[in-house]
Image: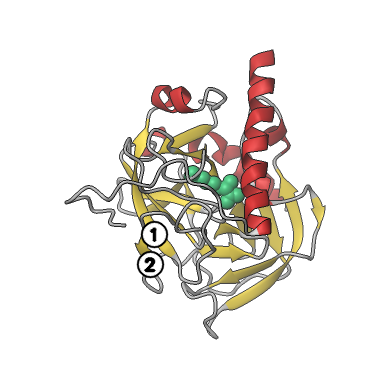
Amino acid sequence: MSQGKWTARIRRAVLVAAGATMLATGLTAQAAAAPPPPTPGEVSPQVVGGTRAAQGEFPWMVRLSMGCGGAMYTKQIVLTAAHCVDGTGPETGITAIYGVVDLQSPDRITRKSAYVYQNPGYFTAEGGDWALIKLASPIPGAATLKLSTNTANDSGRFTVIGWGAATEGGPQQRHLLKARVPFVSDTACEAAYPSMIAETEICAGFPQGGTDTCQGDSGGPMVRRNANGNWVQVGIVSYGAGCARPGYPGVYAQVSALASAIAARAAKL
Ligand code: ARG
């Protein structure tokens, strides 16, 4: 691997860590620029720039107690981001909330974690910001989200969802938010993030900013409907410079490139 990639990786880790620290300390971030108002006629009106998800709209969506999102991959395994977890091994300290858009709802279903697998490739030039959390017991009847294995889904408009901050530096949300963001080419994304790993990362956002995932959305899915009209997961919320800033799209783990490794590991959990 090149020296450049390593340096860039460290720089990116600092970026992500700074975000995590902000989240932990609750400090108010100084937004570099106020997000522009939504373009009139854009479907995505005001995550950042999002609207509330309806109960049952994204049934496989999970909130994790360390302040991340996730998606049910099987009835007992949650797919999240590598940077949301501490390593690989037995882990009973994470709680997953399933089945509600309102995290305070008495209808919520909770499960403790039993085991965590963190993709070791995440710490190499290969990248791949994904991790699997095996729950202590399955959630009977849980909805699951299929991974996109087809690069044809790596285009168009995506839906992002999460309980993360609705403004850069803002608080976590009680109600699940959703927003739509367009695909951004690797070339355009590399212009914003020179360390971006084109093979295992995919970017999304409007050139003018205004709509994006943000701190606390990490690990959650970026989805779209495939040719058959079914939701498939094309991304995992990974990082960005601030949130919804013009010229800085959100960066996501590219599921189509990672799906076979994720499936193989999940089968062994
Ligand atoms: N790393 C962040 C987290 O831990 C996610 C940031 C996503 N940022 C963005 N601008 N899309 O929650």
Figure quadrant of residue 157: top left
In the displayed orientation, state which residue is furthest to the bottom.
106
**Relative height, residue 95 to residue 122 (above, below):** below
User: Is 108 displayed left or right of 24 in the figure?
Assistant: left
- Say which element carries label 2: loop
- Say which element carries label 1: strand
Categorize mark 1 by other alpha carbons within 10 Å: few (<14), some (14-19), many (20+): many
Tell me the kind of residue under disc 1: Lys
> Nearest the camera: 265 or 99?
99
Q: Is residue 31 visible?
A: yes
Distance between the Cα atoms at labels 1 and 2?
6 Å
Identity of the residue drawn at 65% across and 43% down: 18
In the displayed orientation, state which residue is furthest to the top.
2
Identity of the residue drawn at 59% across and 71% down: 97
Tell me the kind of residue under disc 2: Ala
Is there a contact, CB below 8 Å, between mark 1 and mark 2?
A: yes
> Nearest the camera: 162 or 138?
162
Identity of the residue drawn at 53% across and 26% down: 199
> Nearest the camera: 141 or 114?
114
Which image quadrant: the N terminus? Answer: top right
**Relative height, residue 239 to residue 9 (above, below):** below
Categorize mark 2 by other alpha carbons within 10 Å: few (<14), some (14-19), many (20+): some
> Nearest the camera: 43 or 229?
43
Image position, residue 207 (x, y; %): 33, 35
Q: Which residue is mark 1?
A: 178
Figure quadrant of residue 47: bottom left
Q: Which residue is mark 2?
A: 53
